[in-house]
Amino acid sequence: MKKTLFLLVALCSAFTYAQETFKHEPVANKAEYYAGSYNERKDMDDLLDWAAKFKDWQNESGIYDSMSTSLLVPYFIQNTAAADVVWLNIWPSSTAQYKGLENWLTNGGELMAKLPITNSQVVDTWQWAISTPEGEGTIGMVRYSDCKLKDGVSARQAFDAYKDFAIAAKDKGDNLGRKMIFPTAGGTQGDHDYVYTLYANKVSELGAAADLYWAEINGSNEDLALNEVIESCTNSRMYSSIDIKVATN
């Protein structure tokens, strides 16, 4: 089982040797996942009301201008009772993230006490963006899978293969976002090297991209090259997504 040591080595080697050894340079950001269930007699409307108050609170300081926030609701998932919702914060850097956390822990107690959900798991991650969808949507869809690399393959090699695949797919009309995610604290242990996410700004675009893959991309050189570095991707789960806050800088 590859654990945190693998992740740290992969991240450090990525930044140290990327320009000399690899084709593409990953840009790392941070993300926090808060999985929870509604408190008694509370529901999504209560959480959205709380989210509006949270936006007003964070706007007072400007500390959260670089943070984007989404709500993920389980849809196609093995255990729908595990959590009602996942609150996702994405930050451009660890510095910005932990400055925000410090302010929240110091000054957010009153608001936290009114949160209508109870969190059962909180995960801190690094993320490498592979592709980003164009356009906007009201309700999106995201899929997560636990992936394992073939023996001797590094995360950087996999990133290069993913990036080449995403570029080729876009030329065929693909408009999906992709990320490699490396949980560093709070993640569920398992026999995988990273979590792969595939997402769309509109639910319909995820379905269209699936048909496009089988019609135009499957079996391409880039598809075959990607298969050469990935051993397996399992435990796929899908969520609908709603934007709560978009980063302004």
Image (tube, grey):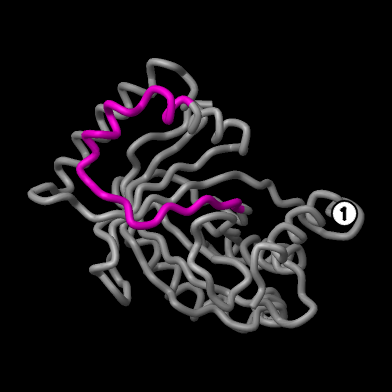
Residue at x 25%, y 34% (from the top left corner): 113
**One can see residue 241 in this view:** no
Q: Given the current orientation, which residue lies at the most extreme right position?
A: 20
Q: Nearer the viewer, residue 134 or 119?
A: 119
Amino acid type assigned to the residue bearing label 1 in the image:
Tyr
Nearer to me, 131 or 62: 62
Q: Quadrant of residue 105?
A: top left
Pinpoint residue 227: horizontal percent, then vertical percent: 66, 81
Residue 79 located left or right of residue 195: left
Secondary structure type for disc 1: helix
Left or right for 122, reference 177: left
Q: Nearer the viewer, residue 249 or 15?
A: 15
Q: Residue furthest top?
A: 60
Q: Measuring from the top left, give residue 199's x and y in whole percent.
A: 45, 59
Q: From the viewer's perspective, is residue 139 above or below residue 230? A: above
Q: Is residue 116 magenta?
A: yes
* Label 1 environment density (alpha carbons within 10 Å; few <14, some 14–19, many ≥20): few
> Which residue is tagged 1?
17
Q: Is residue 114 above or below residue 128?
A: above
Q: 221 left or right of 147?
A: right
- Regarding residue 110, the answer to whether it shows in the image is yes
Magenta stretch encompasses residue 34: no
Residue at point 7%, 49% (across, down): 41
Split into 4 quadrants, where in the image is the N terminus? bottom right
Q: Position of residue 234 (x, y in %)?
A: 49, 79
At x 28% / y 57%, what residue is drawn? 73
Residue at (59% x, 75% y) in the render: 192
Q: Which percent across, then down, holds residue 211?
A: 43, 75
Q: Which residues are magenta?
A: 103-127
The quarter of the image holding the C terminus is top right
